[in-house]
Image (cartoon, helix red, strand yellow):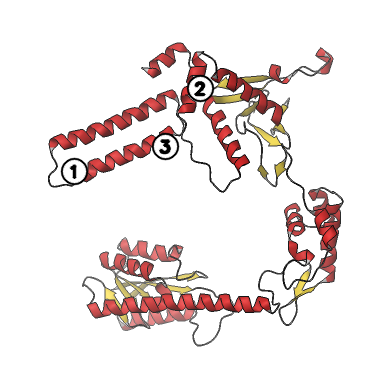
Amino acid sequence: MLNVLGYTRVSQVGGRRGPSFRSPGQQEADIRAWAERNGARVVEVLEELNRSGGDGDRPVWNDVLRRAEAGEVDAVVVYDISRFSRDVADGAAAMQRLATAGVRFVALEDKIDIGGREAAAPMVQFQADVMLAFAALERRSKAERLARSRAEAKAEGVWCSEVPLGYRRDEHRRLVVHEPDAERVRQIFTLAAAGEPWRAIARQVGRSSAGCHRIVRNPVYKGAVPGAPRIVGDDVWAAAQPGPVKPGMRSGMVTSTGVLRGLVRCGSCHRRMAIRRTNYCCANECCPDRMSASVNLLDEHVQMAFADALGSDTPLGAMMRERKAHGGALAAQRRVIAEERAELERYHGLRGCTDAGIEQREAAVAAAEAELDRLLAIGAADTPDVSPLVSPEMADLAERRRDMARVVESVTITARATRAERGRWSPLPERVAVAWRGDPGEEALEAAAA
């Protein structure tokens, strides 16, 4: 008996109706009816909703192909070929995978039946290719019509996006001010303009801090977006805007400073310290003596110590210079090894390969692996390139963080003397213990260099 795996898909369920719309239930009924007529057994009918046929990375669709290639079924059946795919390249590749696995492919509405243990007839394969092309053309045409309709609707004042707080849609789908919510929006702007903290604003208006922040930054409320009536004036909107992030402060939830982030530890509980505003702070509430230190002062102190050691003639300075010079070399060397191994495999596949040629390429692989071992011995590090999308300041910060991580094992903030003991707080250098990564000593450095 033929084991059948059905697949149904609807790109957008919504409230669609009409004869052109085949619901997942109708598609499944057609698949089961075909199986009954042909004496086949339906193993399962997999359903995929709200996914475009032009998406080649649909989870359920990929699961269908995986199960077919694993030999779990003998045939894959769909209502029509557009349910299977609306992309010529993806659809053709998927049908080829089914054919290679010996799995039959059936599209009921298009009367396509190919694959299985026998090669498809040229005309049937041509029909499948044509129907895929028509499905792809229909998808592109719908997308163009939708984009044109949205542009025309926006030009007429119709609001096509999510309705912001403070507005409602009228019977013509245009935005109108909803006074109860609009008053809350004005209250958020007024409090923000007065300099109230975001948490205090959120408590007063009953929203989250992030939600209040998004409302204040949204230009729709000052009438800058076509089709949206104004709720606040330009002066109130400008006064409520958050200022630039100051050094040592946090922008949202992303810490914008801290060269030693992840390296600083509390001398009392020995756990990593977090960055809170302008300080490295122990976040362990059970710590008996939670340490803290200024981000700017601690970063400056450790970087100065790093620069002093880097310029010294000590073994530690030599190690630091070597590691800094080889930053990123591990990733590059691994690429070299992969290329040499690929060349060796390619040469093995040639008809005219000789023992001398094989030995030469094996020697190249061995040399590349030996260089990788040497870099590992001196402590080189993988350092991916900084994304070009980040600002120059953040790129420089990322580079300095990588420099620190290559040479610093940890920075411990030790206990400080109290005013009662010494009459003043201990200076930061007296409370900082820097453990340099690997700090090997002369004998170990000489062994690694050899």
Q: In whole angstroms, how far apart are the C-alphas of marks 2 and 1?
A: 42 Å
Label 2 amino acid? Met
Label 3 amino acid? Ala
Label 1 amino acid? His
Q: In whole angstroms, how far apart are the C-alphas of marks 1 and 3?
A: 26 Å
Q: Which callout, 2 or 3, points at the residue further toward the start of the chain?
A: 2
| x and y, in percent, of residue 18 in the image | 53, 87
Query: To which quarter of the image does residue 98 belong?
Result: bottom left
**Which residue is nearer to you in this view: 372 or 156?**
156
Q: In whole angstroms, how far apart are the C-alphas of marks 2 and 3?
A: 19 Å
Whether residue 287 is visible here, answered yes or no, is no
Q: Which residue is mark 1?
A: 348
Q: Which residue is mark 3?
A: 331
| x and y, in percent, of residue 184 in the image | 83, 62
In the image, residue 415 above or below residue 120? above
Q: Residues within 10 Å of mark 2 (few under 14, many from 20)?
A: many
| x and y, in percent, of residue 9 in the image | 46, 73
